Amino acid sequence: MQHNVLGKVTCFITRETDTKIELLLIQHPNAGIQLPAGTVELNEDFKQAALRESFEETGLDGFITCNYIGKQEINLLGKYIVFQKTKVFSRPDLSSSQWAEIRRGITVQQERRHGEFVQVSYIEGDKYPDPNYITYQITGWVEESHLASKVSRHFYHFHSNSNLNKWEQEADNHTFKLFWSPLDELPEIVSPQNEWLKYVLNDLNYSF
């Protein structure tokens, strides 16, 4: 049985205006309002990953301060997360046909097990949450050694002096819309990211 642990990072980027503290948010084209976040690459440390993901998803760098503010360990039940890019086989057999791959960091549902293989499904709706229909799906067999059943998520708080207010950034084959929101007027952030706000609020000693 495998015991891989996949590293993830979430980045809270804030700036101060004359009267408020603002948090940088991403309007995803299909998946609601989000925080900058992503997967730690192989041979990359968590802070490097946080800085890289922040730049890739927002275009910002050169932060005034970069604070590590906590972590969360999550054991996955009934699902896995891809630990290393994996081929998807039509049977639990390396000699069977395979034409699809799933990249590192993608969450998949467990369907069944056979020996050292797990049959998994990646299912994507037309929007998140509350999809109208499944727009993309991959189901097949992958080697269990390529999967992780635990996620270690580390949180970072970056202080920015950016003068940009609204802009767009190309990332992950999407166009993200970036905007700042005052902490006391935050829009609805997708779950479970909305539950992570406590980390940055504690770091700022902020209360509503």
Image (cartoon, helix red, strand yellow):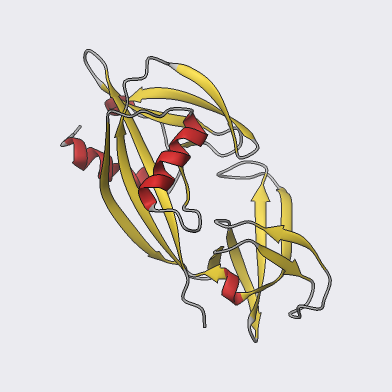
- Locate residue 157: give its quadrant: top left
Measured as percent of width and height from the top left, residue 35 is found at 43, 38
Count of all numbered marks drawn on residues in the image: 0
Left or right of 157 in this view: 28: right
Is residue 193 something one can see in this rendering? no
- Locate residue 114: give its quadrant: bottom right
Left or right of 19 in this view: 95: right
Residue drawn at x 27%, y 28% as measured from the top left: 64
Picture layout, residue 156 above or below residue 97: above
Residue drawn at x 41%, y 49% as measured from the top left: 9
Measured as percent of width and height from the top left, residue 18 is found at 22, 12
- For the C terminus, which image quadrant? top left
Measured as percent of width and height from the top left, residue 77 is found at 48, 70
Left or right of 116 in this view: 81: left
Measured as percent of width and height from the top left, residue 143 is found at 65, 75
Left or right of 63 in this view: 189: right
> For this rendering, which residue is in front, 114 or 98?
98
Which residue lies most toward the front here? Answer: 43
Residue drawn at x 44%, y 53% as measured from the top left: 44
> For this rendering, which residue is in front, 44 or 130?
44
Which residue lies most toward the bottom here? Answer: 115
Residue drawn at x 65%, y 87% as measured from the top left: 115
Is residue 28 something one can see in this rendering? yes
> For this rendering, which residue is in front, 161 or 35?
161
